[in-house]
Image (cartoon, rainbow, N blue to C red):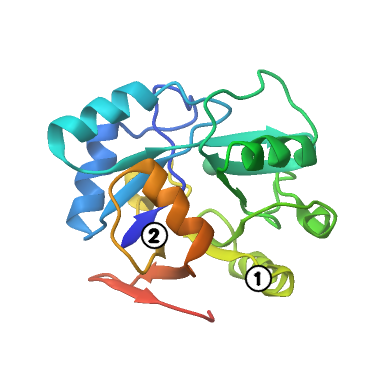
Amino acid sequence: MLVDMHLHEKTFSTDSFLSLDEIVSIAKAKGLDAVCITDHDSMGLRETAEEYTRRTGFPIFTGIEFFSLQGDITAWGLESYPDHRIPAQDFIDLVNTANGFCVSCHPFRNNNRGLEEKLRDVHGLNGVEVLNGSTDVEANRKALRFCRELGLQAIGASDAHTTQQVGKYVTYLPEMVTTLPDFIAELRTLPTRPAIWNGSGYDVVDEF
Ligand SMILES: [Zn+2]
């Protein structure tokens, strides 16, 4: 299945122009099987997204993009989350205690919000965004090198804030799942691969 694992919806991400309806309709048009909502330091959309999924049958997995003291980390599986910035390692520990899944997003993007080389210092990360839609190709390639070195899951995600960005990069998972617990279980156990929108479909890639 193909999932865009990093999207911002405008209700709780004030820098986003995207409504949930727009996200889902673009995702469906591009052939995606699910999307993730990862708002900045908020899981406020979770109930709305769950209700939307019940009504439409389209899976929406609500996570969070948490701005730790060392950089942004996307995570799934938390019931609650800190209301202030805490060290990356402490946040990662929270996610693993909850049997969740966490990803260093855009680790080398030039906005001072990635973990950068601190990727090597933290323990318990599950994945790295090797293709982030708002990051240049060299920074994404560096993320891929670190991901390989550390043996973590390779994640692709648009990080979309506008309609044009939705689904630019996504993640391929070998098995189809529809619930958040199954999604997390699969992410923790089966290999993922990034995929790139080519204008009419997706290329699942190991290099780029
Ligand atoms: Zn983001």
- Mark 2 lies on a secondary structure that is loop
The front one of 160 and 88 is 88
Residue to which mark 2 is pinned: 168
Q: Position of residue 38 (x, y in %)?
A: 48, 37
Q: Identify which amino acid the numbered label 1 is placed on.
A: Glu
- Mark 1 lies on a secondary structure that is helix
Confirm whether residue 157 shows in the render.
no
The front one of 114 and 92 is 92
Q: Looking at the image, which residue sits at the far left?
A: 56
Quick check: 110 above or below 99? below
Local packing at callout 2 (Cα closer than 10 Å; few below 14, some 14-19, many 20+) is many
The front one of 157 and 16 is 157
Specify which label sits upstream in the sequence, 2 or 1. Answer: 1
Quick check: 68 above or below 44? below
Q: In which quadrant of the rendered view does residue 202 lie?
A: bottom left
In the displayed structure, does residue 82 sit left or right of residue 167?
right
Q: Position of residue 148 (x, y in %)?
A: 67, 74
Q: Which mark is residue 114?
A: none
Residue to which mark 1 is pinned: 138
